[in-house]
Amino acid sequence: MNNIKNTENSIDLSDKLADYKKRIQNYLSAKINPRRPFSLYDPIHYTMSGDGKRLRPALTLLTAEAYACSIEHAIPAAAALELLHNFTLVHDDIMDRDDTRRGRATVHNKWDVNIALLSGDGLVALAYETLLETASERILAVSKLFTQGLIEVCEGQALDIEFEKRDDVLADEYLEMVGKKTACLLSMCTQIGGLLANTDAINIQHLKQFGWSLGIAFQIQDDLLDITADQHTIGKDFGSDIKQHKKTYILIHALEKGTDTQVKKIRAIYEKPNIENDDILTVKDIFTEIGAIEHTRELAADYFSSAKEALREISTKADVTYLDAFLNLVLNRKA
């Protein structure tokens, strides 16, 4: 049995996450702020100064700390993962034509598409520069994992775009896509945290499974929040996935289980070049009637359970108290 303590009398996770966020923000500000030209670094600074939760670097630091690794030792790699994540957001917003992100104008909306593309490229370059500031005898393994993860994230985004033009996307294809686009990055966080702490290959595999299952659950949950959360809470366009004709698990299940009439109504809305908020509310009602929203919630819960099971397989040498608390925090998020 692994070392999961009763957190009732321990440091609150929110305090720890706030400390991590401050450390990462200070590190990134020192790296970005002095740089020129402004046309490149102002949008990058704008992106990185947004009110993001910094969940990915926090997951990296929590994993390293679980094996008694110094937080300072892991901060460069954690910051690199946050830079990489924000690269995906800047480019995703261009492709999805989203106007807002985290309650603010997206980079391409505040500046223009060319600036946003260049800023995304700059974020990738900065991510590698930052990663290579990590002092570790396992930096080669970390760098290979980071590079392979970047490739998979791009593959996942490509599949996501391809799915927009298809009417026959299967549930397994969807799960493959989110595995590459989202779960891969969270799995990178846990594996890199373990590598920096010099844990063994068996534990790295458990950490990989933990991060991957958590990532799948996170993305399915994100798809749900896109149409179930308040727009001001979620910080991006309400029903963005529907507006962009994305093939989410909710949609795939609804098309498979809905009646002919329900399916026709859904397809008629998804075929519109411009989908309005009233259309999104109609689709949401049909999803609810079919049971697709509830079924998708159950699927997310299954993956959260898989993540918890993987966490329980980690060595007794690791104190995964805060990783367990992190999982529960993500499980109960509202945006």
Image (cartoon, rainbow, N blue to C red):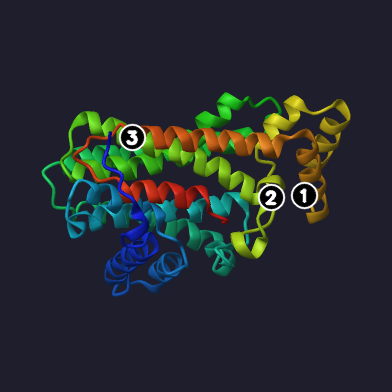
- Image-based side of 240 in relation to 150, left or right: right
Residue at 66% across / 46% down in the picture? 241
Q: Position of residue 137 (x, y in %)?
A: 11, 43
CA neighbours of label 3 inside 10 A, class few (<14), some (14 to 19), many (20+): some
Foreground residue, 333 or 132? Answer: 333
- Quadrant for the C terminus in the image: bottom right
Foreground residue, 183 or 160? Answer: 183
Residue 280, numbered circle = 1
C-alpha separation, residue under disc 3 versus residue under disc 2: 33 Å
**Circle 2 or circle 1, nearest the eye:** 2
Residue type, mark 1 in image: Ile
**Circle 3 or circle 2, nearest the eye:** 3
- Image-based side of 164 in relation to 267, left or right: left
Callout 3 secondary element: helix
Q: Where is residue 284 in the image (x, y as percent from the top left)?
A: 76, 45
Is residue 328 something that shows in the picture?
A: yes
Residue type, mark 2 in image: Ile
- Quadrant for the N terminus in the image: top left
Residue 312, numbered circle = 3
Quarter of the image for residue 144 reads top left
Residue lying farthest to the right in this orientation = 261
**Circle 3 or circle 1, nearest the eye:** 3
- Image-based side of 66 in relation to 285, left or right: left
Residue type, mark 3 in image: Arg
Callout 2 secondary element: helix
Residue 50, numbered circle = none
